[in-house]
Image (tube, rainbow, N blue to C red):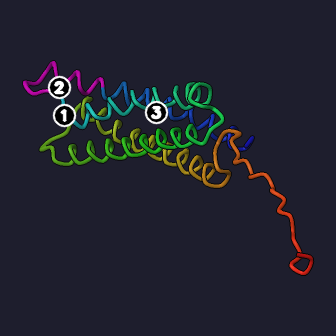
């Protein structure tokens, strides 16, 4: 368990930094589209904006809310945490693949906004890798120990059954 905490906390910090970077890059690209073009920002940029906000809220929930307030000693909180972790994996994967496909379809890509969008793809892919790593670690802990927190199944109490001898009856 100590190894789990020493590995997960630095991963959470890296996830937070990547989420802030992607949030800033996506905001810049979306602002450029909304102010200098007649079309609105692409949905893939907006989705990465959502994914980074969701990640920041997820880190808050995984580290502070779920372990303390959502039935901390039950298996339910462990599976809720695993679900939040794996939903981040899904969102980051969909976000960076969607933006990469969008950028590959552009007729031209130049200037600081294009470089920012390309960096957005790179940081989103890195965030996906980090979330995948922490998701695998968390899933392994849930399956191996039956839960992340100190939850353990209670063994049923032993019941003594009197033995009767058929010859005596």
Q: Residue 42 — which label?
A: 1
- The tag earlier along the polypeptide, 3 or 2, is 3
Q: Position of residue 9 (x, y in %)?
A: 63, 34
- The tag earlier along the polypeptide, 3 or 1, is 3
- Is residue 39 within the magenta segment? yes
In what element is the residue under mark 1?
A: loop
Above or below for 156 versus 165: above
In this rendering, position of residue 21 left or right of residue 10: left
In the image, farthest residue toward the right: 168
| Number of numbered discs overlaid on the protein picture | 3
Measuring 64% from the left and 50% from the top, which residue is drawn there?
146
Magenta residues span 27-40
In this rendering, position of residue 40 left or right of residue 22: left
Q: Position of residue 21 (x, y in %)?
A: 42, 29
- Asked which quadrant contains residue 54, the reply is top left
In the image, farthest residue toward the top: 35
How packed mark 2 is, by other alpha carbons closer than 10 Å (few <14, some 14-19, many 20 or more), is some
Q: Position of residue 55 (x, y in %)?
A: 44, 32
Q: Residue 18 — which label?
A: 3
How packed mark 1 is, by other alpha carbons closer than 10 Å (few <14, some 14-19, many 20 or more), is some
| Label 2 vs label 1, nearer the camera | 1
In the image, farthest residue toward the bottom: 167
Residue at which label 2 appears:
33
Measuring 86% from the left and 78% from the top, which residue is drawn there?
166
- Asked which quadrant contains residue 7, the reply is top right
In the image, farthest residue toward the front: 169
Answer yes or no: do the residues labelled 2 and 1 have beta carbons within 8 Å?
yes
- Is residue 98 within the magenta segment? no
Above or below for 168 versus 75: below
User: Gap between marks 2 and 1, in whole Å?
Assistant: 8 Å
């Amino acid at each position: 368990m100590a190894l789990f905490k020493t590995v997960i906390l630095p991963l959470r910090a890296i996830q937070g930094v990547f989420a802030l970077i992607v949030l800033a890059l996506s905001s810049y690209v979306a602002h450029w589209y909304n102010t200098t073009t007649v079309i609105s920002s692409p949905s893939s940029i907006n989705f990465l904006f959502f994914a980074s906000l969701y990640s920041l809220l997820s880190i808050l929930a995984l580290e502070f809310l779920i372990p303390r307030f959502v039935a901390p000693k039950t298996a339910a909180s462990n599976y809720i945490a695993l679900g939040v972790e794996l939903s981040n994996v899904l969102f980051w994967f969909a976000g960076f693949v969607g933006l990469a496909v969008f950028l590959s379809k552009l007729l031209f890509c130049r200037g600081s906004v294009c470089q920012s969008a390309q960096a957005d793809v790179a940081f989103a892919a890195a965030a996906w890798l980090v979330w995948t790593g922490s998701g695998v670690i968390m899933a392994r802990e849930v399956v191996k120990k039956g839960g992340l927190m100190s939850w353990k199944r209670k063994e049923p109490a032993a019941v003594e059954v009197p033995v009767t001898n058929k010859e005596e009856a």
